[in-house]
Image (spheres, rainbow, N blue to C red):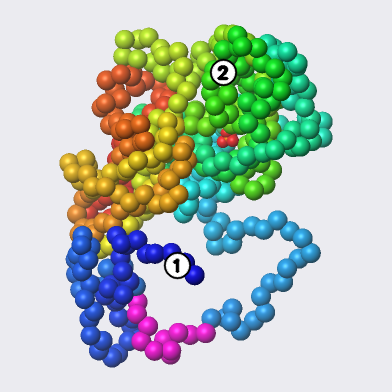
Amino acid sequence: MKVIEKPKDIVDSSKIELQAGSSMTHNRKRRSFLRNSIAMASGAGALGVSAVASGQDLPVPESNKQMGRSIPPEEYGLPSKFEAQVKRRRSDILVNRQNFSDWSMTPLQSQPGITTPNGLFFERHHNGVPDINPDTHVLALHGMVRKPLKLSMSDLMRYPSVSKFYFMECSGNGLTDWLKPASKTVQQTHGLLSCAQWTGVPVSWLLDEAGMLPEVKWLIAEGADGSAHLRSIPVEKMLDDALLVYAMNGEMLRPENGYPLRLFIPGWEGNVSVKWLRRIKAGTEPWHVRGETARYTDPMPNGMWRKFSFVMEAKSVVTRPSGGMNLQRGFNEIQGFAWSGNGKIAAVDVTVDGGKTWQQAVLEDPVIDKCLTRFRFNWNWQGGPAVIASRAVDSTGYVQPTVEDIKKSRAIVGFVQHHNGIFPWNVSASGEVTNGIG
Ligand SMILES: Nc1nc2c(c(=O)[nH]1)N[C@H]1C(S)=C(S)[C@@H](COP(=O)(O)O)O[C@H]1N2
Ligand SMILES: [Mo]
């Protein structure tokens, strides 16, 4: 049998000096604990874990003495009631006067792996969530094609499918935090970011079937929601890796994420992944719709605006410790996510001194193209103020910029889009973690 090897940089629990429990009377010889950077700050156990002296220290829990809940004939399982605080949340900075153009954010501080559970996947709707019956939903492929196609959901699901892990990030992720006042938690600063395994049919297969004309340069996708959301997408991207997605994380899409069908454009701003997709039209020019002119473009210092900013460039954030948490002295594993719309994550550096020095974090497998990558870094906090941040490097060699770097090429005004700046968390002398931008 193959065992999962414990990574060498991880604290070896056999070498951690465990703190004596209160009922522990006998004298146990201290085991040595010292490993590389994880030097002990005091005589107390690094992780503050209590040792068990004998069986008597282990009372039998009530749950051992009763029958458990039985399985109902059928159900959709839900998380433990003790996890009730793990929820999607709307912004605590911008209070909308109406709820139709709104968003909710993923609790990244509570996400242990790279996939976001469907009930926690962030949402962004320009005019609410439509209620679409898959039995009557139709996808049309038309415009500059030889044979326009109309497909029902059951037609589409007869095609072979692929399943791919990709992150999705709204270009407005963090937009409140480069302005004042700043959000408190990583959910509020970075939660317009989620990651899932997406299942569907490559757009290229259907464009091939429809006989797309060689002159086609751009395609436009439209949603069946109240905002009739539209985006123009270059043909190269559509043929490269765009998907017609009907499922995420092993079940059909949730209504809020585009049920029964959405376009998925890997690595690009979430806005182009048109939900509730009803048609794709082929043409030669971008259509310059509202979402491409009044929104989703970036101002530059000279007052001009960029035409398109599709790709979400490399970015990372520390999720533990993060805003609202309280640090304990001694060993702390700094954890976070890194991602890039241009490829794989090659490295992540971590600083605990506000960027004076950087050290390389460990990347957790799997490291997937255009997908969230987990990183971790061992830190022995001795008390005293600290500023923690991470910096991602992707497979193209691109390094996540500082806020100052971004300001050189971009005007940071209004609702800042596509901001991938290095994001700091302040740690106070007493261990309170707060937004380091504010
Ligand atoms: N039809 C339609 N598609 C849409 C939107 C919308 O409002 N209507 N919002 C876009 C935006 S701005 C983003 S960031 C993503 C969000 O996808 P999600 O709600 O599944 O996270 O959907 C995009 N696709
Ligand atoms: Mo978005």
Residue 72, placed above or below residue 100: below
Q: Residue at x 29, y 60 (%)?
A: 9
Q: Which mark is residue 3?
A: 1
| Left or right position of 422 against 226 | left
Q: Residue at x 54, y 42 (%)?
A: 165
Q: Quadrant of residue 297?
A: top left
Q: What's drawn in magenta, residue-wise?
A: 50-60
Residue 172, placed above or below residue 215: below
Q: Nearer the viewer, residue 302 or 339?
A: 339
Query: For the residue marked with disc 2, what is the amino acid?
Result: Val
For numbered disc 1, what is the local secondary structure? loop
Q: Is residue 405 magenta?
A: no
Residue indicated by mark 2: 235
**What is the distance, in whole Å, between disc 2 and disc 1 at their CAs?**
46 Å
For numbered disc 2, what is the local secondary structure? helix
Residue positioned most to the right: 136
Q: Look at the image and tell me in which quarter the C terminus lies.
A: top left
Q: Earlier in the sequence, mark 2 or mark 1?
A: 1
